Image (cartoon, rainbow, N blue to C red):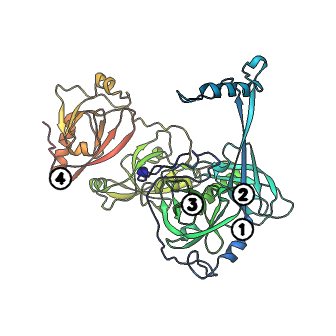
């Protein structure tokens, strides 16, 4: 895999699973550097991870035997082709290479050099890391370490090789549970509370970088709650402890010898450690591991809503004050949220007693809540706090229906209306065809947008459909200007638009109206 160019450092590109099972950590492109920040120590035994006089030898000796190497192998069937590999046009040695490969393939093909279509097996293997959490032989690693493997072997520090059974695995948080059988109890480690970790706390990573064998590195917690866009439950611990290829699935310890994270990915322009590593927190993986051990699959809670973040404009238009919570942009018709009375425009402030500070907090909280539980959900609606109770469903990995309920088609108007820099028209059959808008999408269609207008600045484009203004449905283009005018007269500084694309996916957009021409023209 070629290194990520330096000019792409401003974009995160999580590559861990995309590099294949052998590349057990990711090479990403981002120009961040962590400096020699002082750190606080945890646990009863003082130790210094970097630059201090204390040794980590006792801590390492107490846990290293519980850290294992994971050898995952895969058998791939290939058909033998009778053609030589293609060479770049104009290669000076075309004839030489062609003759060489023909002679080589004659031994593999049938008589007279005829190509053989008989499948042949090719075996590939890779190395990762893992750790034992139960003396009976329960081993934890990353899902991408064993994904697609036909055979998994756990290699202990004493050299013993034990065949492993995959008990269960989950790609969403990238964790897998293995089981091995041993004649004697195995050395194990325990999970700690990752929520207690603070930025600056010392940590120690143990793994198998580049297949060298057990290796110990140390550092600090550089940051918490990192989102690197690798999945729906991103909540990584960032550390400057060296993590390289083969460290994936290995444990990140606190100074008490407890596992507070699973080393999963790194950021690097070259594929090697530059001091920016990411570990999945123990509090995220522990509920998943429990489910995999009990059910051999995950059983996540499911609310059945589509959410988005709350910015300053949305908070002001709703009267929420400080931006917080998760704004419901849509409700799944088959989900638990609909019968509970939740609706688009509600802001979820807490779920099952847990505060929702930002929209990305909600999926993790919901997923970790037991299926079937009656959950109190605190919401902000119509300018006041309310609480509804939802009987939580089970997450289904299928495409959710996003169409709004059908409404009567408005009567056609002779001329389009303009508002907030948008030209608005009745959603006629011709316009549906022109912009490829589904029949289930209702509202008024945007036919033109002034790029310098408030709407243009918010990314609204021709073909978008306005369904609501401040949670009031639109039945005609003139309604938009009238509602904006009423908001201005009421002293409002922004309007909250519900915008749908042609497929029916909706989002809320807050647009400033103080200096905008809002009346119909």
| Residue 472 visible to an observer of this rendering | no
Label at residue 64: 1
Nearest the viewer among 327 and 288 is: 288
**Labelled disc at residue 279:** 3
Numbered disc 4: secondary structure = loop
Query: How far apart are the alpha carbons under marks 1 and 4?
Result: 67 Å
The residue beneath circle 2 is: 69
CA gap, disc 4 and disc 3: 50 Å
Mark 2 surroundings within 10 Å by alpha-carbon count, few (fewer than 14), some (14 through 19), many (20 or more):
many
Answer left or right for 474 relative to 303: left
Classify 96 as above or below 252.
above
Local secondary structure at mark 3: strand
Which tag, 2 or 3, sits closer to the chain's start?
A: 2
Q: Is residue 413 left or right of residue 229?
A: left
The percent coordinates of residue 499 (x first, y second) are 32, 40
Quadrant where the N terminus is found in the figure: top right
Decide: is 105 above or below 1. above
User: How many numbered marks have been drawn onto this rendered protein structure?
Assistant: 4
Q: Position of residue 428 (x, y in %)?
A: 28, 25
Of mark 1 and mark 3, the one earlier in the sequence is: 1
Q: How far, Cα to Cα, is label 2 from label 3?
A: 18 Å
Quarter of the figure that contains the C terminus: top left
Q: Residue, x 73% and y 37% (percent of image)?
A: 122
On screen, residue 429 versus residue 343, left or right, reads left
Badge 1 crowding class, 10 Å Cα cut-off, few under 14, some 14 to 19, many 20 or more, is many
Between discs 4 and 3, the one toward the N terminus: 3
Q: CA distance from mark 1 to mark 3?
A: 18 Å
Q: Nearer the viewer, mark 2 or mark 4?
A: 2
Q: Which residue is mark 4?
A: 490
């Amino acid at each position: 895999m070629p290194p990520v160019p330096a000019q792409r450092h401003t974009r995160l590109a999580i590559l861990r699973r995309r590099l294949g099972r052998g590349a057990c950590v990711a090479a990403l492109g981002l120009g961040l550097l962590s400096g020699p920040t002082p750190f606080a120590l945890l646990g009863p035994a003082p130790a210094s991870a970097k630059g201090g006089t204390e040794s980590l030898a006792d801590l390492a000796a107490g846990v290293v035997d519980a850290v294992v190497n994971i050898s995952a192998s895969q058998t791939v069937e290939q058909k033998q082709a009778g053609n030589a590999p293609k060479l770049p046009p104009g290669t000076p040695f075309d004839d030489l290479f062609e003759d060489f490969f023909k002679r080589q393939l004659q031994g593999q093909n049938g008589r007279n050099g005829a190509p053989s279509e008989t499948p042949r097996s090719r075996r590939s293997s890779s190395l990762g890391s893992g750790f034992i959490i139960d003396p009976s032989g329960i081993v934890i690693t990353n899902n991408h370490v064993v994904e697609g493997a036909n055979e998994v072997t756990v290699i202990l520090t004493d050299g013993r090789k034990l065949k492993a059974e995959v008990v269960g695995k989950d790609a969403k948080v990238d964790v897998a549970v293995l089981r091995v059988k041993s004649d004697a109890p195995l050395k194990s480690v325990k999970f700690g509370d990752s929520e207690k970790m603070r930025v600056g706390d010392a940590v120690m990573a143990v793994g198998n970088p580049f297949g060298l064998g057990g290796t110990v590195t140390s550092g600090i917690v550089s940051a918490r709650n990192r989102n690197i866009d690798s999945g729906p439950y991103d909540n990584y611990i960032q550390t400057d402890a060296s993590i390289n290829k083969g460290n994936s699935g290995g444990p990140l310890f606190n100074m008490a010898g407890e596992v507070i994270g699973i080393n999963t990915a790194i950021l690097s322009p070259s594929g090697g450690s530059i001091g920016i590593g990411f570990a999945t927190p123990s509090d995220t993986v522990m509920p998943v591991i429990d489910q995999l051990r009990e059910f051999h699959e995950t059983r996540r809670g499911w609310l059945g809503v589509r959410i988005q973040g709350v910015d300053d404009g949305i908070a002001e238009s709703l009267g929420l004050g400080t931006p917080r919570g998760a704004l419901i942009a849509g409700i799944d018709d088959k989900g638990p949220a609909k019968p509970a009375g939740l609706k688009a425009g509600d802001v979820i402030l807490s779920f099952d007693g847990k505060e929702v500070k930002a929209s990305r907090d909600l999926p993790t909280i919901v997923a970790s809540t037991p299926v079937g539980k009656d959950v109190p959900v605190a919401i902000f609606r119509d300018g006041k706090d309310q609480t509804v109770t939802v009987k939580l469903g089970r997450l289904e990995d299928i495409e959710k229906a996003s169409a709004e309920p059908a409404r009567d088609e408005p009567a056609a108007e002779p001329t389009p209306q303009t508002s907030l820099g948008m030209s608005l028209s009745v959603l006629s059959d011709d316009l549906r065809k022109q912009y490829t808008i589904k029949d289930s999408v209702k509202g008024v269609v945007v036919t033109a947008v002034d790029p310098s207008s408030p709407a243009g600045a918010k990314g609204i484009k021709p073909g978008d459909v306005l369904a609501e203004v401040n949670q009031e449905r639109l039945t005609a283009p003139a309604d938009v200007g009238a509602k904006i005018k009423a908001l201005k007269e009421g002293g409002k500084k922004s309007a909250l638009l519900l915008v749908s694309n042609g497929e029916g996916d909706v989002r809320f957009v807050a647009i400033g109206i103080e200096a905008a021409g809002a009346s119909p023209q």
